[in-house]
Image (cartoon, rainbow, N blue to C red):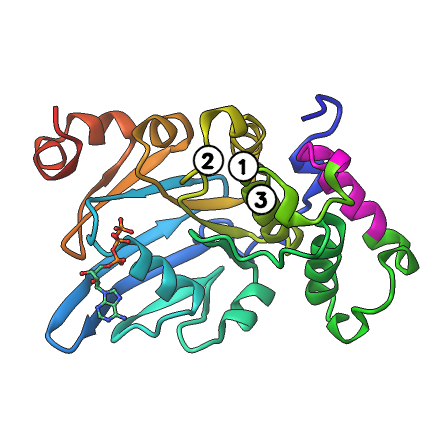
Amino acid sequence: MSPSVNLNAAVPTAPAAASPSTPLLAVDTLCKHYGGLQVTRSVSLALQAGDRLALIGPNGAGKTTLVNQLSGVVAPSSGRIHLAGQDVTDLSQAQRVRRGLARTFQITTLAPTLTVAQQLALALFEREGLAGRWWRPLAAYPALAAEASALLLALGLDALANAPTARLAYGDQRLVELALALALRPRVLLLDEPMAGVPQAEGHRLLAALDRLPADMAVLLIEHDMGLVFRLATRIAVLAEGALLAEGPPEQIRQDPRVRAAYLGH
Ligand SMILES: Nc1ncnc2c1ncn2[C@@H]1O[C@H](COP(=O)(O)OP(=O)(O)OP(=O)(O)O)[C@@H](O)[C@H]1O
């Protein structure tokens, strides 16, 4: 990543909430069950601007299901979700994106034949409500073209702009996914295991980008890699069997005997 370009400048986030004390994301007693299986049990969380909250927990604890409810993939059974003070519980994924919530997925969701620049152009068109003009070159929109260039440069993807995504190393594909989410200018970014499956040798640009996400963005990160969790997180929330077992600063969570017993080990 070029030291002269930073993500704070390349990704201006959407305007902040009306009141600075209103959380950017507030989750209130969220519950989800599938028949008799309780997957989310009365989870409440709040994220402020600048928060880096890692959601950890054993396999099957309900992390992905929780994030799926936040992004609108899965409807909660009960409870409410607020984005910057607005109730979004009944809104679609696209409507939540327009209100400032973006996510990356655990599984690569890129179109393999499109180039990095084309994928980014589609995301920018979508954000600007220009999706019907996808056939026009991005160059027809100079401000968007400049934004795309700045984002690619800031992420260290500029040299790969014209490469089809299928030809990229896996770590770079995950970085493109992050670029697409950032192109939506989220206030709240949900990251589902961003480094999963990325070989160490391919991960440095992605890791640098995660370290340098815009300072005023609220980030919720699902991650199994405790090295990454303790590197990035300002707070950690631990899920066990669908319920919030503990939440707090990393050192407090590291010392929590219940967390050690449930997940971290010794
Ligand atoms: N659509 C569904 N129907 C029924 N059960 C489901 C459904 N989706 C998830 N579950 C169940 O909910 C539980 C939580 O799954 P989830 O994938 O959210 O856990 P997780 O913490 O993300 O796990 P991992 O760390 O392995 O990704 C599991 O028991 C899973 O089988």
Determine whether the residue tagged by mark 2 lies in a helix, strand or loop. Answer: loop
- Report the magenta residues as a range: 145-159
Is 253 in the magenta? no
Q: Residues within 10 Å of mark 1 (few under 14, many from 20)?
A: many
Determine whether the residue tagged by mark 3 lies in a helix, strand or loop. Answer: helix
Q: 259 or 187, which is in the foreground?
A: 259
Quarter location, residue 265:
top left
Among the two numbered marks 2 and 1 on one chain, the one whose residue lies closer to the N terminus = 1
The residue singled out by tag 2 in the image is 198
Q: In the figure, is residue 254 to the left or right of 3?
A: left
- Specify the label residue 211 is tagged with: none
Residue occupying image coordinates x 75% and y 64%: 125
Q: Position of residue 221 (x, y in %)?
A: 40, 44
- Specify the label residue 173 is tagged with: 3
Residue type, label 2: Val
Q: Quadrant of ligand 1?
A: bottom left
Find the distance from the CA under tag 2 to the CA under tag 3: 10 Å
Q: 172 or 8, which is in the foreground?
A: 172
Residue occupying image coordinates x 42% and y 78%: 90
Residue type, label 1: Gly
Q: Position of residue 92 (x, y in %)?
A: 49, 75
Find the distance from the CA under tag 2 to the CA under tag 1: 5 Å
On-image quarter of the C terminus:
top left
Q: Position of residue 28 (x, y in %)?
A: 29, 63
- Specify the label residue 171 is tagged with: 1
